Structure formats: structure tokens, C-alpha cells
Amino acid sequence: MSFSSDALLLSTKLKIPAPRRNYICRKALFEKLSDCIDMGVVFISGGAGTGKTTLLTSFIREAGLKNVCWVSMDASNANVYSFWMYFTAAASAFWEEDEAFLDIMRANPDPSHMEGLLIMLINRLCSEEDYYMVLDDVQYIKDEVLIKTLEFFLKSMPANFHLFFLSREDPPVYLGPLVMSGRFLYIDGKQMKLSFEEGMSFLRDTLKLTEGEEELAKLNKYAEGWIGGLQLSVAAGQYSGQFLRAGGGIAAEYLTHELFESLAEREKTFLVRTSFLSYFDAAICIELLEDYSVTDFEEMVEELIRKNLFIVCIDEENRVYRYHNILTEYLAEQFKKLSDKQKKELYKKAAAIFLERGDFEEALGGYYAAREYDSVLSIAKDMDGRIEAWGYLDKVPVDKLMSDADLAAQCFMYNLGNMNMERCRVLYDKFREYYGDSDIFHIVQFAEGYITHSDLILPEYHALSAAQIECLPFGQAAKAMILVENSAALIEQMEYGEAENCALKAIQTSKGINIFVEFFGYTQLAQVYEEIGRMNDSLACYVKADELFCHPSMMSGVGTSYYFGLVGIYMRRMELEEAKKALEDSRALMNSKHIRMDVARVTLIFHEAELSLLYGDKERCVLKVEEILKEYPNLSRLTLGRLIYELDCIGKLPKEIEEKFIAELETASSYRAQPFMRLLRARLLFKRGESGEAFKETDDIMTFSRLHKNKLRLIEAGLLKVVMLSFRIEKTLRHREIDNLLKEAIHYAWEDRILMPFYLEREAIITLLKELFMKEEVKATMPPAELSFLKDILNTCGVEMAETREPETLSERETEVLMELAQGITNREIAERLCISQATVKTHVLSIFGKLGVSSRMMAVEEGRKKGLISR
């Protein structure tokens, strides 16, 4: 398998090492390994130099095993990002589109999304063919997040996929289910020991020793089956058994030392100065070392191999090598003895070579080791947000990192995604220090509530203009994410048109570039529409978001905001079963993905309380509110605004919560200006007897809402005014104004089926609504769709009303329009098909609603089918 330089992965880690020359066939172990086709995991354990790699590579060759891939791990692959990147890159060798799946993995760096990615990977690995993957040196796996994701993969991986683990230590993951199912094969250090016959064959045929039988037998006996000890002792010319008995600890250290001292100076220099490399070949060594030619390199490697040093060939065709860990560990100590200047020069030379080759990760490692942080940042910049750079970015001194806001923001997101909140706090404070109250600081300020606040009140967002966003030093995808955040800020500032424009631009900018940003763009646009009462448009946005949510490259971990948004819309429309289902989905997602963020937890309980209230279970609603305050005693009461309003509607608002809310609101200027908060304040003021201020506040909200086309707040404010007016004495004036307010609320609510505000105020307004419904004047003048919606309001509030008129027959044109509605097409498309204007279509649709006694397109189609007006 070949990798382009754009893959940014070290391809040598994905090469299957060549078996050592003249390897011995370990028949007993080969026989055990032949059962690999029936195993999920084959775990081979043994200390350094026990021959794990040679055993497996020789078995693969002897058995003619096909569809085998390999990952040679080291410390740099011990995090969840790098491990699964290399894992996916290796597995991609099984498919023709070898980098397409890798790109999906690279585009999804958040660990909370990893299980969704692994489900995709598991599904992709399902095949009628058997696939084999070797993970070498898995003792590096220590990270809890990585272990958790690996256990998830093992639990669900397909039967045709087989894993070989090579390790110096016991398994880092739980393998109980595989053991119980008989799909686990374990080969330990004892089994790895050479038999006496194998040891003799190794000495004669592999190491080519010509000593007498007795001397070789003695050495073999002392080695006690440790293949590394035999090799080291022969290389050093030491046949004493006292060190061999240590089996890889003292013996390895002593014999490596003895071996190294026996080498020529030129050989020592070569070994030490190449010891820090992950791999090397002639071209690298010629650049790295002075006075070296291709011939010099080949002769040096041949001589070292002849001396039985621990050198592993990882690419026979291109003659690429690496050192075995036994030798690497010793040489690392020798490398430390070089002067700082020498080490730095070697690191820089190697980094430059790797950079030229396109091995960016190795180049990053070299420049980081040389403390050439400017070069690290430069390469990371060229990698354009690739996650392979993030681990190195996180190691760069913070003050140096902050010189590039884009890279610093990437590092911030890396730590936020990895839930390293302490590191996020450090970076957040540095953003504040370096960029003050600038636009750049504002782009990370959205996370303040997650990393600095205990009251769960999110910070005040700072909206940016389109020109400000365009001037930020970020790429298109990042700018799209900023547009999404900007939209949220603009909602808080009641600039709904601009909020809508920002969300739409984010969707347009991210389309085809970043599916996550596009997803959040649609959910944010849905929130804009919900705020101003465009519930149908909000649901349409969630339909679009759902299409992205179900895309193979989308991770289910992002779904909490999606489900919570749906719950809100369904409750506004009193579609309680749909709301309940969405809430159950959000709870299941949080449990399955182990989402423990306080904001998500509070939102879940919040919605459970609301839904209980709407189902009529007042006591459970109160208990849920008490649960929130008990679990989060410092929670700002402003966060509970909607619940406070709803509790007051049913007469269950505790005085202590009311007082704290009013006190907090008076000191929170940004919240104090928002229409809903003003509405709640007006309600509480009226209850306290401050009716003049309450009416003034309500009238101001209605004026503002009409001006800014905020249907939802206009409905809520109108109904609140009805409630307040119902306490006045002047009945004639009161009824005229009340009727007008109710009719206005119905007018703005019917199309989007905004029923919840009427239900909440039902105890105060139910009689007024019934009176309105029974008035002949209203029956004669109110549009049929609105009158039908009024009936729906009464039904929702528990009042059954008789039919007001005999159903009318649809005209021929109305029937044609109804048939087109059944096709699910838009008014514009209907107009084009029937050669009429969109305004005429809308008139026909409203007439159809009235005649059929319905209030939505879907209901009209269903009623038309019941009456036989259109075919099913």
C-alpha cells in the first residue's frame, strides 16, 4: 500500500516488517497460529527480544496469509486520535478507496464522536473475506479514552476481522467476552521460548555459528530459550550464562553495553547519530551524516546485520530499516551524551529531510525535539487544521503558541474536545491576556461557561459584523463556525434578521467543506426561527440537520443539541408524544456516550420538568425543579426563566425562586433587555400589584415584537395582557380589547400551530376563548383556518366544542390544489404546475383548511383522503 504525502502519516509504521534472514520455522507455534482464522484476537506476550515480531512475520510468510495489515506503535500513537488514525490507515489497505475513509476519520477529531466512527469502521470491515491486522508494541496503550474505544471496537468487530496483539505486557483491554466465546488465543513468554532444538537451529542456521556442538549446546542451555539473549551474546562474543539467566533485563543492558564497546568508532557513530530516527534509509543517512555515500550506507548496514545487531528491515524493496527496541533503548542513553548543540543539529537535519519527503509528523517531532517552535508552528499552519499536528501544538510553549491565533484556537478546540478543561483554562486566560476584548478573544469566549462558571450561565456573546469575521485570520470552515456563534449572539441582541443571515451564510460556507459546521448551522438557524415563532421553518431546519446527522461521517455524539431543539419545538406545538420520544432519544444518547457535562444534564432535567407540566403532572414538574436546584445549588435563576414562567402559570412558583430571579435580572443588563425576560418580569410585577409597570412593559414588548416580526413573543405578550385585563372592572372595554388580543394571538399562532402559550394560560383565558368561539360575528369574519385553530386550542385545553358549520364542498380548482398538496410540493411549485400565482395558491390553501376543518397541509391531505377527495 502506498501513501501520498497528503496522508500525513508515517507510512513506515504501516509496513509489515520483513522476516529476518534464515528464520527458523517454529512449528508448534505456527500450528497454534493457524487457528487465527477462528480467533477474534491473538495475543502474543513476551519481553524484549523474545522473537514476537519474527514469529509473526515468518508465520505470515509460511502460511501465505492474505489481507494482512500492520501498525508498529510507539509512544506517539498512544492517544485516541493518533491510534485510530493509523488503525484506519492500515485497514484502508483492504479497500480500493484507500484514503476516503481515512479522510472521514481525520475530519472527526472529537473523542465523543469516536464510537460513531468506529461503528462506521466496523460496518466497513464486514466482508466475506478474512482480514488480519497486527498491532505491534501495544504496551504503549495506557490512555483511558483509547482503552475505552478499543474495548468498544473489540466488542462489536465483525467475525471476519482478526487482530494480533504483540506486547511486552499483559493485555491493556478487557478480553473476557472473546475468551468466553472461544475466540481468543494467548501465547505468553513461556511459550515464546525456543525449544532446545529450535535454539540449536537458530545458532547454526540463522546466526551461522560454526563452533562445536558442545559449546553451542552449552550456550543454548544457558539462554533458556531467550532468543534475544542468544543473539546479543553472540554479537558481543560473550557466552557466559550468568547474564542470560536474567532473561532480558540485566542481560540486555549488560550485553548491549558489551556489544557496543566492541564496535568500531565509525559503527558507534552511525548507531548513535541515527538512534532517534523512527526509520532510516540511504538517502536519510547521507543527508544526516558527513562523508556518507550509498555504498557506505549499504556496507555499514550489512556489517551491522552480519554482527547480529538488532536491526529490523521494514521495507526490503526500498531498503528501509529501524532499530529493535532492545537496541533503541540503549542507544537512546548514548544519544543523550552528545552535546546539546550536536543533538539539536541532528534533530533539525532530520526534520528538514522528513519535511521534504512529506512526512510532516516526523518533521514536527524533529523540530519540536530541537525546540524550533517557529518551525513547528509553520508546519502545523501548512497542515491546515489536520489533527496530526494538534499533539505537537499542545507541547509548544503557550506564549509562543499564542503568536498565531489560528493555531492557538486549534489547540484550544483539541483540549476542549479531549475534555482537558485545565489546559483549556490556561489557553482561555492566555487568549484574554493576548487579545483582550478583541474579536479574536470573542471566538473562544463561547466556552467560558464550560470552563470557568459554576452557575451554568453562558457568557454574554459578542456579535461580530460580516466584515469583522472576514478579517479574522482563519480558514473558511473556522469562519463558518464563528458565523454560527455569531448567530447565537445576535439572537441575544434581538437582531433576528442578522442572526438568520449569519446562520444561512455559515451553512453556505461550510457546505461540502465541513459537515459538522453545516449541521450546527442548521440547528442554529432552527433556534433563530423558534425564537421568533417560525416553528414550521424551524422543523424544516431540523429535517435538514437530521439528513446530516444520519450521514455516515456524522457522529452521534453531537446529537444532544439536535434532540433538545426538537423537544422545544414539539412542546411549543403541544405534540407531546413526539417531544417525549425526542427527550428519550437525548437521554439514551447521553447515557450511551457517557456525556456528563453539567449544561447537558441540567437541560435534560429542565425539559423533563416542562414535559411533566404539559402532561398535567404539576407535582412531578415541581420535583424536577427541586432536583435541579439540589444538584446545582449555585445555579443562576436566570437559567430557569422558562420554568419559572410555567410554574407561575400553574401557581406553583416558590417565593424564594421568584425573589432570586428578580434580584438577578435587575443586575444582568443583557438578559434584562430580552423580550422573554421582560415578559416574565411583567408577569411577576403584576402579581405584586405593580400593574402600571407591568402593562407598560407588556405593551413595549408587543410593539417591539410587531416591529421585529417576532410572532412567538407577540403571542405570549398578548395572552399575558389578556390575563391582566381579565382582572379589570370595565367589562365592555375589557371584552373588546380582550377579543382583539385573542384574535391577534390566534392569527399569528395558527400557521405554526403555537399552542403551548394558550395551554399555559388556560385557567385564566379558557372562558374567554369559549365566548369568542361562540360569537356569530367571529364565526362570520374569522378566516376558516384560524377558527379551526381556535377549536384546536380549546380541545388542547380540554374543552370539546361542537362543529360550527356544515362542511363545505371543495371547488374543482381547490381539489386540484389539494391533490398537489398531497405530492408534498411547495406553493411556488403548485403555482407553476397549475399556471396560477402563489398568492392564489395560498388563498386556495386557506379555503381548503377552512372547508375541511384543519389547520395544516398534512392534516388537509389526510382529511381529503378520508373523504375520498384524493386517492391514497
Image (spheres, rainbow, N blue to C red):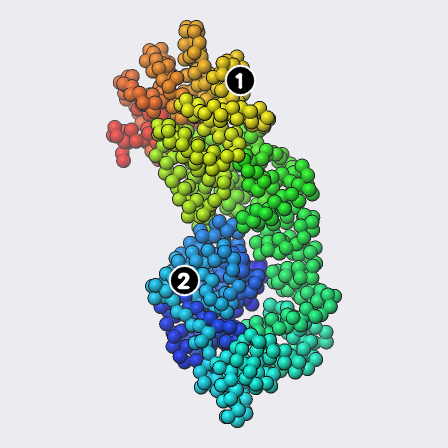
Secondary structure of the residue carrying numbered label 1: helix
Q: Is residue 710 above or below residue 400?
A: above
Nearer-the-camera pick, 128 or 492 = 492
Q: Residue at x 74, y 66 (%)?
A: 341
x%, y% of residue 714?
48, 21
Q: What residue sits right under mark 2 in the picture?
A: 175
Q: On screen, 577 above or below 380? A: above
Q: Is residue 88 left or right of residue 33?
A: right
> Between marks 1 and 2, how big is the CA–CA gap?
65 Å
Image quadrant containing the C terminus? top left
**Nearer the camera: disc 1 or disc 2:** 2
Give, as a three-letter code, the residue at label 1: Glu
Q: Classify mark 1: residues with Cα within 10 Å, few (<14), some (14-19) or many (20+).
A: many
Q: Residue at x 47, y 58 (%)?
A: 147
List x then y, in percent, for residue 77: 54, 61
Q: How many marks?
A: 2
Residues packed near mark 2 inside 10 Å, few (<14), some (14 to 19) or many (20 plus): some
Nearer-the-camera pick, 428 or 362: 428
Q: Quadrant of residue 209?
A: bottom right
As drawn, is 831 to the left or to the right of 495? left
Residue located beneath label 1 in the image: 697
Whether residue 818 can be seen here: no
Q: Is residue 602 shown above or below 863?
A: below
Residue 723 position in % (x across, y down): 43, 16
Task: Please report the residue visible at 50 percent of the width from the left and 46 percent of the height from the top.
Answer: 515
SS for callout 2: loop
Q: Earlier in the sequence, mark 1 or mark 2?
A: 2
